[in-house]
């Protein structure tokens, strides 16, 4: 078991309820402290936001580097794994919404 680290991008379209900006990193931290895999982490964040505030849509994208890839096996130092979970009105396939990953990559430091 080796850790992974990276950036989490969260977007949602409100449907009456909104959450404070400090709640999003707190939610991410709760799930990321558990022993788990990146795919499950992505899904859990999106499903929790969907369940709690019932927005029109939720999109979560995680870009992470895995120490297992950096230290062992393929030994690719700058490889990133990207996972996404799109719920509600967000398109499920990247070819239907090419702008979402493009917006993420254009922003320095995920800001």
Image (cartoon, helix red, strand yellow):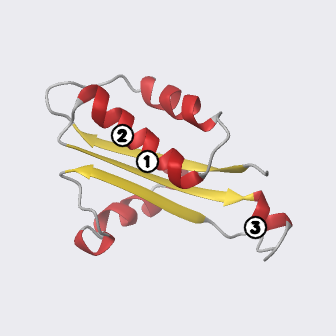
Q: Is residue 9 left or right of residue 17?
A: right
Residue linked to disc 2: 47
- Do callouts 2 and 1 mark residues in contact (Cβ within 8 Å)? yes
Helix, strand or loop under label 1: helix
State which mark lies toward you, 1 or 3: 1
Tell me if mark 2 has few (under 14), some (14-19) or many (20+) residues whose alpha carbon lies within 10 angstroms of its own: some
- Do callouts 3 and 2 mark residues in contact (Cβ within 8 Å)? no
Q: Is residue 65 left or right of residue 97?
A: right
Please tell me whether residue 84 is drawn above or below residue 45 in the rendered image: below
Image coordinates of residue 84 in percent, x first then y, are 42, 57
Image coordinates of residue 51 in percent, x first then y, are 29, 31
Q: Within the image, what quadrant is residue 31 found in? A: top right
Image coordinates of residue 94 in percent, x first then y, are 32, 70
Instruction: Find residue 21 and name its label.
Output: none
Tell me if mark 3 has few (under 14), some (14-19) or many (20+) residues whose alpha carbon lies within 10 angstroms of its own: some
Q: Nearer the viewer, residue 17 or 88?
A: 88
Instruction: Find residue 43 and name its label.
Output: 1
Q: Nearer the viewer, residue 108 or 43?
A: 43
Q: Residue at x 44, y 62 (%)?
A: 106
Q: Nearer the viewer, residue 94 or 20?
A: 94
Q: Nearer the viewer, residue 88 or 108?
A: 88
Image coordinates of residue 87 in percent, x first then y, are 27, 50
Q: Within the image, what quadrant is residue 76 found in? A: bottom right
Q: Marks 1 and 3, how far apart in space?
A: 22 Å
Please tell me whether residue 31 is drawn above or below residue 110 in the rendered image: above
State which mark lies toward you, 3 or 2: 2
Q: Residue at x 78, y 62 (%)?
A: 68
Instruction: Find residue 69 and name its label.
Output: 3
């Amino acid at each position: 078991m080796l850790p992974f680290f990276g950036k989490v991008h969260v977007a949602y379209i409100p449907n009456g309820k909104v959450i404070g900006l400090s709640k999003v990193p707190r939610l991410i931290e709760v799930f990321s402290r558990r022993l788990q895999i990146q795919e499950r982490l992505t899904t859990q964040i999106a499903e929790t936001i969907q369940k709690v505030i019932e927005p029109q849509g939720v999109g979560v994208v995680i870009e992470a580097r895995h120490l297992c890839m950096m230290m062992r096996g393929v030994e690719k130092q700058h490889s990133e794994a990207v996972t996404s979970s799109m719920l509600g009105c967000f398109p499920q396939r990247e070819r239907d919404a090419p702008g979402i990953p493009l917006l993420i990559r254009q922003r320095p430091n995920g800001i």
